[in-house]
Image (cartoon, rainbow, N blue to C red):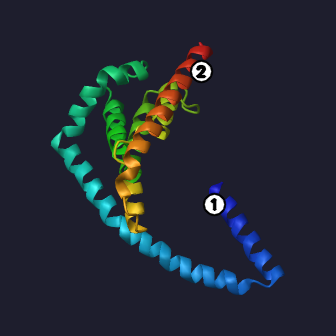
Protein backbone atom coordinates (compact mmCIF):
# COMPACT_ATOMS: atom_id res chain seq x y z
CA UNK A 1 0.00 0.00 0.00
CA UNK A 2 2.77 2.45 0.90
CA UNK A 3 4.61 1.72 -2.35
CA UNK A 4 1.44 2.54 -4.29
CA UNK A 5 1.04 5.80 -2.36
CA UNK A 6 4.68 6.83 -2.96
CA UNK A 7 4.43 5.94 -6.65
CA UNK A 8 1.26 8.00 -6.94
CA UNK A 9 2.87 11.01 -5.23
CA UNK A 10 5.98 10.80 -7.42
CA UNK A 11 3.88 10.61 -10.60
CA UNK A 12 1.81 13.61 -9.48
CA UNK A 13 5.02 15.57 -8.81
CA UNK A 14 6.50 14.73 -12.22
CA UNK A 15 3.25 15.52 -14.07
CA UNK A 16 2.91 18.80 -12.18
CA UNK A 17 6.51 19.76 -13.01
CA UNK A 18 5.86 18.99 -16.70
CA UNK A 19 2.68 21.10 -16.74
CA UNK A 20 4.34 24.06 -14.98
CA UNK A 21 7.57 23.78 -16.97
CA UNK A 22 9.74 22.98 -13.94
CA UNK A 23 11.14 19.63 -15.07
CA UNK A 24 14.68 20.98 -14.63
CA UNK A 25 13.96 21.55 -10.93
CA UNK A 26 12.90 17.91 -10.59
CA UNK A 27 16.04 16.69 -12.36
CA UNK A 28 18.32 18.83 -10.19
CA UNK A 29 16.47 17.79 -7.04
CA UNK A 30 16.73 14.09 -7.88
CA UNK A 31 20.44 14.30 -8.61
CA UNK A 32 21.46 16.44 -5.62
CA UNK A 33 19.18 14.78 -3.07
CA UNK A 34 20.26 11.28 -4.08
CA UNK A 35 23.84 12.22 -3.21
CA UNK A 36 22.73 13.79 0.08
CA UNK A 37 20.73 10.67 0.95
CA UNK A 38 23.75 8.47 0.27
CA UNK A 39 25.95 10.72 2.44
CA UNK A 40 23.40 10.53 5.25
CA UNK A 41 23.17 6.74 5.05
CA UNK A 42 26.95 6.42 5.08
CA UNK A 43 27.21 8.73 8.09
CA UNK A 44 24.57 6.74 10.04
CA UNK A 45 25.85 3.31 9.05
CA UNK A 46 28.76 3.11 11.56
CA UNK A 47 26.46 3.96 14.48
CA UNK A 48 23.85 1.41 13.44
CA UNK A 49 26.48 -1.27 12.81
CA UNK A 50 28.18 -0.58 16.16
CA UNK A 51 25.00 -0.78 18.22
CA UNK A 52 23.65 -3.74 16.27
CA UNK A 53 26.94 -5.53 17.00
CA UNK A 54 26.69 -4.64 20.68
CA UNK A 55 23.13 -6.00 20.74
CA UNK A 56 24.31 -9.24 19.07
CA UNK A 57 27.13 -9.60 21.61
CA UNK A 58 24.67 -8.93 24.43
CA UNK A 59 22.32 -11.56 22.99
CA UNK A 60 25.12 -14.15 22.63
CA UNK A 61 26.47 -13.38 26.12
CA UNK A 62 23.06 -13.89 27.71
CA UNK A 63 22.65 -10.27 28.80
CA UNK A 64 19.33 -10.01 27.00
CA UNK A 65 18.12 -13.18 28.72
CA UNK A 66 19.00 -11.62 32.08
CA UNK A 67 17.25 -8.43 31.03
CA UNK A 68 14.20 -10.52 30.10
CA UNK A 69 14.21 -12.20 33.51
CA UNK A 70 14.53 -8.75 35.11
CA UNK A 71 11.50 -7.60 33.11
CA UNK A 72 9.56 -10.83 33.70
CA UNK A 73 7.34 -9.41 36.49
CA UNK A 74 6.38 -6.45 34.30
CA UNK A 75 6.01 -8.54 31.13
CA UNK A 76 3.81 -11.09 32.92
CA UNK A 77 1.41 -8.27 33.86
CA UNK A 78 1.45 -6.78 30.35
CA UNK A 79 1.12 -10.17 28.64
CA UNK A 80 -1.03 -12.35 30.95
CA UNK A 81 -1.96 -14.75 28.12
CA UNK A 82 1.69 -15.61 27.38
CA UNK A 83 3.25 -18.43 29.46
CA UNK A 84 6.07 -17.20 31.71
CA UNK A 85 8.75 -19.36 30.04
CA UNK A 86 7.68 -18.65 26.44
CA UNK A 87 10.48 -17.55 24.06
CA UNK A 88 8.43 -14.57 22.86
CA UNK A 89 9.07 -12.82 26.18
CA UNK A 90 12.83 -12.93 25.57
CA UNK A 91 12.38 -11.42 22.12
CA UNK A 92 10.03 -8.80 23.53
CA UNK A 93 12.63 -7.88 26.17
CA UNK A 94 15.34 -7.71 23.50
CA UNK A 95 13.12 -5.47 21.39
CA UNK A 96 12.51 -3.21 24.38
CA UNK A 97 16.24 -3.03 25.12
CA UNK A 98 17.09 -2.10 21.53
CA UNK A 99 14.34 0.52 21.42
CA UNK A 100 15.57 1.97 24.72
CA UNK A 101 18.90 2.55 23.00
CA UNK A 102 17.13 4.21 20.08
CA UNK A 103 18.03 1.41 17.69
CA UNK A 104 14.89 0.77 15.71
CA UNK A 105 16.86 -1.07 13.04
CA UNK A 106 18.36 -3.44 15.62
CA UNK A 107 14.98 -3.82 17.36
CA UNK A 108 13.13 -4.87 14.21
CA UNK A 109 14.48 -8.48 14.00
CA UNK A 110 13.62 -9.04 17.67
CA UNK A 111 10.14 -7.62 17.08
CA UNK A 112 9.56 -9.89 14.10
CA UNK A 113 10.72 -12.94 16.08
CA UNK A 114 8.48 -11.94 19.00
CA UNK A 115 5.46 -11.62 16.72
CA UNK A 116 6.26 -14.96 15.10
CA UNK A 117 6.41 -16.63 18.52
CA UNK A 118 3.22 -14.91 19.66
CA UNK A 119 1.48 -16.11 16.49
CA UNK A 120 2.36 -19.71 17.42
CA UNK A 121 0.23 -19.43 20.58
CA UNK A 122 -2.51 -17.39 18.91
CA UNK A 123 -5.77 -19.34 18.74
CA UNK A 124 -7.20 -17.22 15.90
CA UNK A 125 -4.49 -17.25 13.22
CA UNK A 126 -6.21 -14.62 11.06
CA UNK A 127 -6.65 -12.13 13.93
CA UNK A 128 -4.04 -10.46 16.13
CA UNK A 129 -4.18 -11.65 19.72
CA UNK A 130 -4.31 -9.28 22.69
CA UNK A 131 -0.64 -10.05 23.38
CA UNK A 132 0.30 -9.16 19.80
CA UNK A 133 -1.60 -5.88 19.99
CA UNK A 134 -0.04 -5.00 23.34
CA UNK A 135 3.41 -5.76 21.99
CA UNK A 136 2.78 -3.58 18.95
CA UNK A 137 1.62 -0.75 21.21
CA UNK A 138 4.66 -1.18 23.46
CA UNK A 139 7.02 -1.35 20.48
CA UNK A 140 5.55 1.73 18.84
CA UNK A 141 5.40 3.90 21.96
CA UNK A 142 8.39 2.44 23.81
CA UNK A 143 10.66 4.40 26.12
CA UNK A 144 13.89 5.64 24.54
CA UNK A 145 16.69 6.38 27.00
CA UNK A 146 19.45 7.02 24.46
CA UNK A 147 18.05 8.14 21.08
CA UNK A 148 21.11 6.91 19.20
CA UNK A 149 19.79 7.42 15.68
CA UNK A 150 18.56 10.94 16.41
CA UNK A 151 21.88 11.83 18.03
CA UNK A 152 23.69 10.49 14.95
CA UNK A 153 21.42 12.53 12.67
CA UNK A 154 22.00 15.68 14.71
CA UNK A 155 25.74 15.04 14.60
CA UNK A 156 25.64 14.44 10.84
CA UNK A 157 23.91 17.78 10.30
CA UNK A 158 26.38 19.70 12.46
CA UNK A 159 24.46 20.18 15.70
CA UNK A 160 26.50 21.97 18.36
CA UNK A 161 24.88 19.79 21.04
CA UNK A 162 23.66 16.53 19.52
CA UNK A 163 22.95 14.92 22.91
CA UNK A 164 20.66 17.74 24.08
CA UNK A 165 17.78 15.59 22.84
CA UNK A 166 18.24 12.92 25.54
CA UNK A 167 16.17 14.49 28.36
CA UNK A 168 13.25 15.54 26.11
CA UNK A 169 13.31 12.10 24.46
CA UNK A 170 13.14 10.29 27.80
CA UNK A 171 10.29 12.50 29.01
CA UNK A 172 8.25 12.36 25.80
CA UNK A 173 8.72 8.63 25.18
CA UNK A 174 7.94 7.82 28.82
CA UNK A 175 4.69 9.80 28.58
CA UNK A 176 3.76 8.16 25.28
CA UNK A 177 4.59 4.68 26.59
CA UNK A 178 2.59 5.08 29.80
CA UNK A 179 -0.36 6.57 27.89
CA UNK A 180 -0.29 3.79 25.28
CA UNK A 181 -0.16 1.03 27.89
CA UNK A 182 -3.00 2.57 29.91
CA UNK A 183 -5.17 3.00 26.80
CA UNK A 184 -4.37 -0.57 25.68
CA UNK A 185 -5.31 -1.87 29.14
CA UNK A 186 -8.66 -0.10 29.18
CA UNK A 187 -9.50 -1.17 25.62
CA UNK A 188 -8.69 -4.81 26.46
CA UNK A 189 -10.67 -4.54 29.69
CA UNK A 190 -13.62 -3.06 27.78
CA UNK A 191 -13.64 -6.01 25.35
CA UNK A 192 -14.15 -8.46 28.22
Image-quadrant location for residue 78: top left
Measured from the top left, where is residue 27 in percent x and y? 65, 84
Q: Residue at x 66, y 63 (%)?
A: 6
Which image quadrant: the C terminus? Answer: top right
* Residue at the outermost bottom position: 24
Query: Extreme front residue here?
Result: 160
Can residue 79 be seen?
Answer: no
Give the structural element (helix, strand or loop) at label 1: helix
The tally of labels here is 2
Marks 2 and 1 sit apart, C-alpha to C-alpha, by 31 Å
Q: Which residue is mark 1?
A: 3
Residue, disc 2: 187
Q: Quadrant of residue 16?
A: bottom right
Q: Is residue 40 visible?
A: yes
Looking at the image, the residue that sits furthest to the right is 19
The 10 Å Cα crowd at callout 2, few under 14, some 14 to 19, many 20 or more, is few
Q: Looking at the picture, does residue 148 appear above or below residue 176?
A: below
Task: Answer with left or right where residue 52 lies relative to residue 189.
Answer: left
Q: Is residue 136 above or below residue 152?
A: above
Point out the tag, 2 or 1, that comes first from the N-terminus: 1
Query: At which x and y percent is residue 96?
Result: 36, 38
Is 113 rendered above or below residue 29?
A: above
Instruction: Give x and y (percent) for residue 174.
Output: 43, 34
Q: Which disc, if any, is residue 157?
A: none
- Relative image position of residue 38 (x, y in whole percent): 45, 74
Q: Quadrant of the N terminus?
A: bottom right
Amino acid sequence: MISILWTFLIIIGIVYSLITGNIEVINNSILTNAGKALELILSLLPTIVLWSGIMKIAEDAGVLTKFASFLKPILSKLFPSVPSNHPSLGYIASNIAANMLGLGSAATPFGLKAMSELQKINSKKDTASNAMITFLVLNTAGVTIIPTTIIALRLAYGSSSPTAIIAPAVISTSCSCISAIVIDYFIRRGKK
